[in-house]
Image (spheres, rainbow, N blue to C red):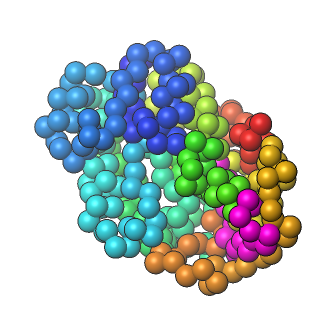
Amino acid sequence: MRILLLGNTGQLGSELNELLPQLGELTALDYPQIDMADEDRMRALLRRVSPDAIINATAYTAVDEAERDVELAEAINVRGVRQLAKHARKKDALLIHYSTDYVFDGKKGSPYIESDFPNPLGVYGRTKLQGEEAIKAEGGTYLIFRTSWVYSLRNQSGFVQKALAWSRQHETLRIVDDQISNPTWAKMLAELTVQVLEKGIDYAKERNGLYHLAGGGYCSRLDWAKEILALDPKKDEQKTRQILPAKSADFPTPAQRPTFSGLNVDFFQDTFEIEIPNWQESLHLAMR
């Protein structure tokens, strides 16, 4: 199997970069080696690699900055994805693309399934939804995996590392309890992607479609932070003595976040016959 991985240095891409070579011949690139908006360069790249599968781990993910930098978010999350989908279709390559729970407004009050109507609250969610729609409209074979709250201990600016840093600086932490979703370990997400491809490229193509793929179960940011601190292997360095609930309104941001954006992952599990670990189990493994 020939695989083209786009975006091999981010928290998900770096995990994929380590796992994918076991499946066959891997070509892994990141910006500035690739520019999905450059049609000529993308065409030349796909002609050279001739991939069976293209995995797109690139994205503009800065939720607040997207409100100010709409053009860049659209260039990466929409126009670049549209070009990639077109080239994948022409090469008859399977396109694997990652999207987000932020395509939903969080007002449903229960976990979202794939057929629920999306209603993004900000530019980031809107551009990711438009990227999904561009892939579907192109008519090739694809697997779109919507995920949520992706974390890696390699990412110093992610929530896990921030929570650990806060615990070493403050006796009292205030964490929002009105944002609820699925914490998703980047390594687990990469492993599940590889498990799908291990079943064969034709198997994956036959299951063309949109799936929710995230850590099993849901929690609030508050409960996530409590679990992170409980699993901290260096608890003696913590200064925090109490963690108090707060509301999103206490911490205004340029972009509004959905409240309950938990993703129901049953469709993925049933279709691919792969069990997804719960978020607590994955967090425990990540922090060992």
Residue 139 appears in the rendering: yes
Point 67% across, 70% down: residue = 179
Point 27% across, 49% down: residue = 80
In the foreground, 192 or 208: 192
Task: List x then y, in percent, for residue 282.
Answer: 74, 42
Residue 194 located left or right of residue 184: left
Point 74% across, 68% down: residue = 170
Q: In which quarter of the image is the N terminus?
A: top left
Start and end of the magenta stretch?
167-184
Task: List x then y, in percent, for residue 180.
Answer: 69, 66
Q: Residue furthest bottom?
A: 249
> Can residue 178 be found in the magenta stretch?
yes
Residue 89 appears in the rendering: no
Task: List x then y, in percent, for residue 154.
Answer: 58, 42
Point 74% across, 61% down: residue = 167
Task: List x then y, in percent, for residue 100.
Answer: 52, 56
In the rendered image, which quarter is residue 159 located in? Answer: bottom right
Residue 261 located left or right of residue 26: right
In the foreground, 117 or 38: 38
Residue 113 located left or right of residue 276: left
Number of numbered labels in the structure image? 0
Q: Which residue lies furthest to the left in this view?
A: 40
In the foreground, 116 or 233: 233
Up-down: is 254 above or below 267?
below
Q: In which quarter of the image is the C terminus?
A: top right
In the rendered image, which quarter is residue 131 located in? Answer: bottom left
